[in-house]
Image (cartoon, coloured by chain):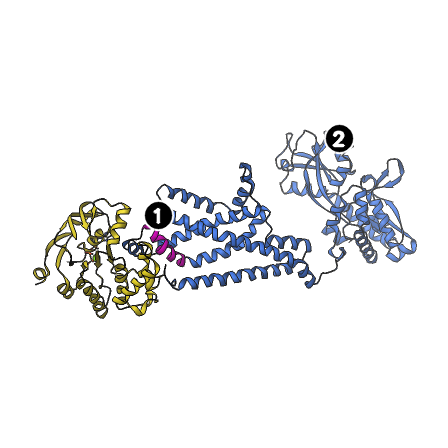
Chain colours: A yellow, B blue
Amino acid sequence: MIEIDSLTKRRAGKPVLDGVSLRGAEAGVTVLVGASGSGKSTLLRCMNGLEIFEGGTITIAGHRLAAGGQSIAALDDLRRDVGMVFQQFNLFPHLSVLDNVMLAPRVVAKVPVEEARCRAVDLLDRVGLSAFVAARPATLSGGQQQRVAIARALAMRPRVMLFDEPTSALDPTMTSEVLDVILDLAKAGQTMVVVTHDHGFAKRAATWVVELAAGRIVRQGTAAAMLG
Amino acid sequence: MIGFRPAIATLACLAAVAASWAIAAELDEIQSRGELVWAADQEGGGPHVFPDPSDPRRLVGFEVEFAELLAGELGVKARFQQGQWDRLPLLLDQTADCVINGIELTPERRRDYGCSRPYFGYALQMVGRRAAPPAMLADLAEAGPAGAWRVGVLTGSAAEIEMRARAARGEAQVEVIGYDGTLDSMEQVQSGVLDAAVLDDCIVTFYADRFAALRNVDRPFAGGLYTVLTSHRTPKLAAAIDGAIGRLIADGRLKKLYDRWDLAGRQQMLMLRDAAEIPVARGRTLGELVRQTLPLLLSSAGMTVLLSCAAFPLAVAAGLAVAVGRLHGPAWLRPLLTGYVEVLRGTPLMLQLYAIFFLLPKIGLALPALVAAIIGLALNYSAYESEIYRAGLKAVPLGQFEAALSLGLTKWQALRHVLVPQAVRIVMPPVTSDFIALFKDTSVCSAITVIELTKRYSVLALSTGRIVELAVVTAVLYLCMSWPLAVLSRWFESRLDRPAGGGQ
Ligand SMILES: Nc1ncnc2c1ncn2[C@@H]1O[C@H](COP(=O)(O)OP(=O)(O)OP(=O)(O)O)[C@@H](O)[C@H]1O
Ligand SMILES: [Mg+2]
C-alpha cells in the first residue's frame, strides 16, 4: 500500500529527509516515531502531496508520486484516496460540524445532498458526536474537534489515512477519546500512518514501526520487535 | 511738501477766526435758505465736474447730478461753489455747506470733518505711452531705462499718497511729480516728459479718447471710496446727507445716474449698499421651505441610494476577483492586476468619472451619465475592496487551505468554499465602512451631470439662501439612508456569524 524509495527533501538547502526508503508498511497501522525535528511531519506531508520533494519516489494507495511535484489532476486524485488529520484539527470555522464533514463529498465527489448527509451523520455517530451535528467547531472541546476532523477525512473513504500527532494538542482524557476512535478504525482494517509519541497506542495498534532521526530511517520493524 | 504744513496751519488759524462769522450752515438754515452750497473744482474735469463742451456756461458731471439729487432730498436747490481742489475742505468754514468732488474717505478726513457714507467707489489706474515701458506695475520695482520712473499725479490725491508711500517703502523706484490739474499728468505722459501717470480709473476711462497715444498699464489697483465732506459743526446736515444717500441707493436713482455716465452702476451699488437697504424678501416659513424642497431632495436621495446600491456590489465582486487573481492567478496576470489596483487607487475618482463620461465617447463608447457614474464608482471602489480582500484572504490560516486540499478540493474549490467565505467574514467591518464611504462619495458624480442629494442641496441652498435649514434637512436624509445601511450590514454580519444551514 505504501512504498517509499530513497526520498530526499531539502529545506533552505539543508536535507530534511535524506534517502528515506520504507517498505514494510503494508495494510495496517504504521507508526512513525522520532525526536522533534527529525522529519516525521515532512514525510507525512510528502505522502499527501502537500510538500514537493527533490529525489526519490512515493507509491501510495496505487498513486505514484515523482520528485519535483505532480500534476494538479494527479494530486486531486491522490488526495481522494489519502486522507489527513492534522495536529491542529484545521476544522472549517464557518461551517457547522455536519457541513465540515459533508463538504468534500459534495464538492469533490459530487455525492447527492441526502446521501452525503446520511454518510456524515453515520460518521459523526461513529466518532461519538451525533449530538453535535449542528454545532460550530469553535464550541467543541479539542478532543471533539479532532474526532470531527477524523470523520471529515473518512467521509471521502480514503484508502490511507495519515495522522500527524493527532493527540499532542490534547489533554489525557481527550487523548484517549481520540485514540479510541483511531484504534476502532485500525480494527476495522483502515490502512493508516500515525505519527505519535504515545508509546501505549503504538504498542496496541502498530503493525509496523519506523523510527526517524535527522531525516533518516534508523530502525524499522514490527511493533513487537521495535517496542519490545 | 515741507513748507506746506505751516501754510495749512496758518490757513487753519485764519479759518478758525473766520468761523465766528462764517456761514457753515446747519440743516435748518439751509432749508430756510432753500439752497445747498456744494464746493468742487471744475478744473478737476470729467467725469466729476466740468463745463459742458457744447455750452461752457453750464456745469455737467456725475457729481453735479449727484449734488442736485442730494439737494432735492433735503428739499432745497443745489448751488455750485468753485474752489481749488486741494483746498476745498477749507471752504466748509467759509461759504460751502459741503464738498462733493472725488474726496476719498480716509481716517484723517473722518477725524477732521464730517464724512458721509460713501457715494462712489474708484480704483487707481496707471497709464503710460503705447509701446513704451513700464509694461506692468511690477516693472516699477526696478529703475527704468533712464533711472527712476517719472510718475505724475494730482497733488493731494489718493494717487499721490499711494505712489509716495510705495516709493518710501522702496517698492517702487519712482519720482512722484504732483500737478494741480487732473489732466496735466496725462498730457505730460503723452508729450514724453513723464513715464506714467496715476489717476482715478473713472477719469482715465472718461478721457481715453482724448489721449489716444496712452494705454492702461496693468489693471486698476488700490482705490477707495468718495465721501461728501461737511463740517463737524453741522451734524444734522451730515445725518441728513447720509439719509439722502441711503435713499438714492435704495431706490435705484444713484445706480441710474452712474449707468447714464457709464460708471458701472451695478458694481457701484454692490460696493456702496448697506445690508439694511436691501429690501428684505418675505420670509418663507420652515414648513413652506420643507414642503417646497423636500420632493426634490427626496428624489435626489433616491439617486444617491441607486448609485450606492448599484455600484457597491459590483465593486465588491470585482474587488474579490482581483484579490483572488493577484494571490492565486497565473503569474502573467498578477502584475496586470497590481497595475489595475494602483492606477485606480492612485488617481482621483473625479478624474476617473471624467474619463469614463467624457473620454470614452471619443472612442465611440458613449455611456449615459448614470451608467458612467455606477461604473466609475464600482471601478474605483473595486481597487480598495481588492486590497481589503487580499488582506482578508491572507489572514485565513494556511492550515485551512491545506486541510481543504488534503480533502481533495482543488485550489479553486478551496478558495470558493473555504478561503473566500472566511475572508468575507474577516473583512466585514472594513467593507461595511467602505460602503458608507462610497455612499458619501456618490456626491462626486455631480461632476458628470448626475444630480444626487449633495448637488441638489447646494443648488437649492443657493437659490433659496436657506443654507442652514436645508443642510439640516439634507443631513437628516443622509442619516435616514445610512442608518438602515448600517443596520443591514450588521444583519449580514450576524447572519454570516452563524453556520450555513443544511448542506452545501
Ligand atoms: N516551514 C518550514 N520551513 C523551514 N523549515 C522547516 C519548516 N517546517 C519544518 N522545518 C524543518 O524541517 C525539519 C523537519 O521538520 P518536521 O516538522 O518534519 O519535524 P517533526 O519530526 O515533525 O518534528 P515534531 O516532532 O516537532 O513535529 C526541522 O528541522 C524543521 O526545523
Ligand atoms: Mg511534526
Q: Is residue B483 left or right of residue B57?
A: left
Q: Residues within 10 Å of mark 2 (few under 14, many from 20)?
A: few
When asked about the image quadrant of residue B257, the answer is top right
**Quadrant of the drawing holding the N terminus of chain B:** top right
Among numbered discs 1 and 2, the one appearing first in the sequence: 2
Total marks drawn?
A: 2
Q: Is residue B136 left or right of residue B112?
A: left
**Residue B212 marker:** 2
Is B421 positioned to the left or the right of B173 in the image? left
Task: Tell me which residue sits at (40%, 42%) in the image.
Answer: B336
**In what quadrant does ligand 1 lie?**
bottom left
In the image, the segment drawn in magenta is B410-426
Specify the amino acid type for callout 1.
Answer: His
* Residue B177 forms part of the magenta stretch: no
The answer to whether the residue bearing label 2 lies less than 8 angstroms from the nearest atom of ligand 1 is no
Residue A34 in sight from this viewpoint: no
Q: Position of residue B293 (x, y in %)?
A: 66, 58
